[in-house]
Amino acid sequence: MKVHLLFPDRDFDAAAPLPPEAETLAADLGLETPVAAMAAGDRLIAEVVRAVLLGSTEADVGLVRFRQGVLADCLDNPRVVKDIYALAGEALDAERKQGWHWADSPSSILGRSRSLLSTFMELLGRIKALADRHGERFHSAGFRGLFAMLDRELDAAYFAEVEAELSRLQFNEGVLISASLGAGNHGVGHVLRRWPKEKSFLEYLTGRQAPSLHFEIAPRDEAGWKAREQLEARGLNLVANAVAQSADHVASFFSMLRTELAFYLGGLNLRDALAERGLPFCLPAPAADDALRLAATGLYDVGLGLKTDGRVVMSDIDADGRRFIVVTGANRGGKTTFLRGLGLAFLLMQAGLMAPAAAFSASLADRLLSHFRKEEDATMRSGKLDEELARMDGLVKAATHRSLFLFNESFAATNEREGSKIAGEITGALIERGVRVAFVTHLYTFAHAMLAEHGDDGLFLRAERPADDGRVFPLERAEPLDTSFGRELFAAVMGE
Amino acid sequence: MQARFPAPPPAAAPPVAVSILAAGPATAFDGEPAEPSCFRDLNLDQIVAAATAPKAEYNLSPIFRAPLLDIDGVLYRQAIFRDLERPEVRATLDAFAGGMRALHANRRRIEAIRYERERQAWFLDGVLLYDAAVRGFAAAFAATELASPGLIAFRDYLAAYAGADRFTRLAGAAAGLKRELAAVSYCVYLIGGHVHVGPLTDEPDFTEEILGVFAKFKEADARDHRVKLSDAGEMNHIEAGILDLVAALHADLFGRLDAFVAANAAFIDATIAAFDREAQFYLAWLDHIAPLEAHGLAFCYPEVTQGKAIGAEGTFDLALAAKLVKDGRTVVANDFQLSGAERILVVTGPNQGGKTTFARLFGQLHYLAALGCPVPGVAARLHLPDRVFTHFERPEVAGSERSKLEDDLMRMRDILAAATADSLVILNEIFTSTTLADAVWLSREVMTRLAELDLLGVWVTFIDELAAVSPATVSMVGGVDPDDDDSRTFRLTRRPADGLAYAMALAGRHGLTYRRLRERIP
């Protein structure tokens, strides 16, 4: 029984390892703030949303549209989706409460699994009822497929069959175990047998042709009773295993259902959080990775927006047909914020969620790779420039020509001449291979060389000095200037 | 149900028809002789411990502690070693030893078992293990080309034994009984304290039914919820009670089983059991030197002589080599030679120059040769000593009544008193706790007496004069290789500063130059 709400053709693998560069990307972009807003206190949502966002490499336009469809159904029917999510959660809670113990015996496993399966069947019935009642209001391929599957697999006859089987597992009339002689004449190959359902066992026993020999365990023979228990355990072991595994299988269906719904509940929560702050959002228009599209209206840093009750700077960019963006300009002028906003918008779009902008369209990337300047090299293992280069080397290993690189003040750990030379060689090689680059930099020599040598391929943005009251202005399309207003800032800070 | 198994035969050594350790009348190599006094000084204790450790259950150290005193005995063993070095002979013996180990494990297990019906089943397994080991061995050995008189004599014994009627009938009967037992199946019905036992007819399997009902939810292999039910090996009385009822259901089969066990209590032949152990002495040694040979170190069969003209080529300290090879380091080989009137090698030279190692290898070589073993070296001719005496410098014992010099002298006196012309004496830095003049004088005295005894030996000393005391002495000098210098790899070189070169070289080292990076992006 498949859920298939995240992928049309496969299960979501929550345990799949994230790409090696993902943690750095999450830290550089400040991903935890939007993740927390989406989770709204639900740990499962946080985990799933984070994993999907950071793992949304190899996304294609079809998959993004598939999820956008499921998301739209969720936005239209939040109550039903939340109810199904809660019922799946109830099932998993029941499983957790049963718990497993290290000293488990087959008969205790059997008893627990039996009662767990009864609970599961009841909850499945309630989910089925929800789907029957509200299915008409869902239009996405994802939800339609899920509801059709429930209808097909879980009919009334099936529920009845399960009930009958579960009642037989109580063994009120003793157990019948077969075995044969193995090594050391020990009984081996114990198998629990079922006798004809219509007869009691004694009737059955006396009706048999062959003789039956018999002894009785004395009431005070403690070791004997323990041995009897062990023998019964051997007989029940396989059947207990079968019942427990069946419970596992049903539980894994609930788990998958809840996990995949968690992602869309994250989308619902994000909508609520943005709406509360009056921030715009849109379902973005994904484009094929070779279309070289990137255009946005009112793009903002969703993390900053969520943190600041909606006071954000919105930028419009039109980088269609451009391979790179170089951002220069004043300190505290919103350069890093812009880069973060762009990166988060990409992640959200690629995952199939809404983008933090009035309009957003972009070619998908197979990897987002961030190279942000680090304040400190904690290990002191290598020099700062060496550290930056080693980090870059690691990112290059993950990159392909369909990747997007986000550089923030990179290669500035050395002097302007050396830094510009390295940044120029690296950026030049990347864009020549078709990699897209967004580069925030103070390196005037580098920025200017990019303009002179690849001006037509790039978009050049500049941050203005913030207003005296700290207000930040949108980035403007402008050529790099050979100052970042550092002297002024210095003067301001020093009070001179 | 509780009847004891017939007691095993008394432990007194049963008669052995053929021994592969000694040609003559069987010598008992199973006492517990003390470790020879030279063992620690020569690091023979490490060598023997390492060689015997993998085969602890065979109690091989008594054999390693009993060097042979006759050349014929050494040749008898060398011939067996040569046969066993051939892979097909080795494989045959290993297969036999494996079979016998399984049998011994089976016998040990039986001793601990309480219930007759259980013990009988293991007994049948033991008989079959023995039969398989002996029959397989006899068949393989018959087709094996052998050169050593020892192994040939044993093969003849084995062929006769395995062909005898009594032996062939034993296994056939055991196998038949075991087949019949394995075919027995039954049903147990448990309700309350009642245990019913009856035959199995056609009752269906419950487990399959359950799995079928929930199959539609199965997406992946589920966790295994089977409880690991420990089978401690021994039956409890309920199992034993059920087994007795099963036996009652099959009275004829279990009656024949009773009779078979009673008739065949002691089925292991004493000579074959002795061979099983003795062969392990050879295999232990070959196994011990095999990794060193694989590392390119040479071993040879020494020519053993009563004469005093001896020598070895490319030999080394076996204990040290085992360590060096483990650490992946090089083993340095040595040569020595004594001819004519030469008897004693006097070794001098700087510290850490391999002097003690040389003294040890000289002693090890002779001792191992007297065991009949192949020894370290490309070639060797060695004296068969009546005893090996060693005197290595030991740290002063705190609280000892005597001074160290006194102690040295008393030990020297004992050696001189006990040594004969056929003895080996190995001295390492004695008389260090006195003045040089004293040491020179004392050493000359001892050397003169050793020369008079006409025995062979090595003397490691800091007293250079000792090397030329008599025609019996030969000087050898240790040394350290001056080229063995690790410091060169950390040499710094001077280079003029070159603007961008440093940064670009750094980028180049990370594969981040324009040219390299373009190639790297797929």
Image (cartoon, coloured by chain):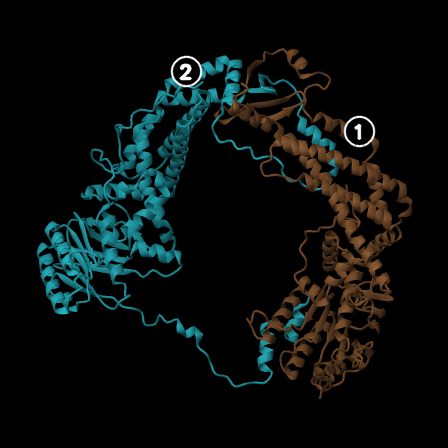
Q: State yes or no: discs 2 and 1 in contact (Cβ < 8 Å).
A: no
On residue B259, the disc is 2
Mark 2 or mark 1, whichever is nearer to me: 1
Tell which of B307 and B467 is nearer to you: B467
Write down the colour of chain A: brown
Above or below, A334 against B194 in this view is below
Q: If the image is split into quadrants, where does the N terminus of chain A sit?
A: top right
On residue A453, the disc is none
Residue at the spot 86% in from the left edge and 63% down from the top edge: A281
The quadrant holding residue B456 is bottom left
**Element type at mark 1:** helix
Above or below, A21 against A483 in this view is above
Write down the colour of chain B: cyan
Q: Residue lying furthest bottom in this view?
A: A496
The verdict on a common chain for dots 2 and 1 is no
Tell which of B296 and B13 is nearer to you: B13
* Chain bearing mark 1: A
Question: Residue A338: image x %, image y %?
Answer: 78, 72
Q: Which residue is mark 1?
A: A160
Question: Residue B493: image x %, image y %?
Answer: 47, 81
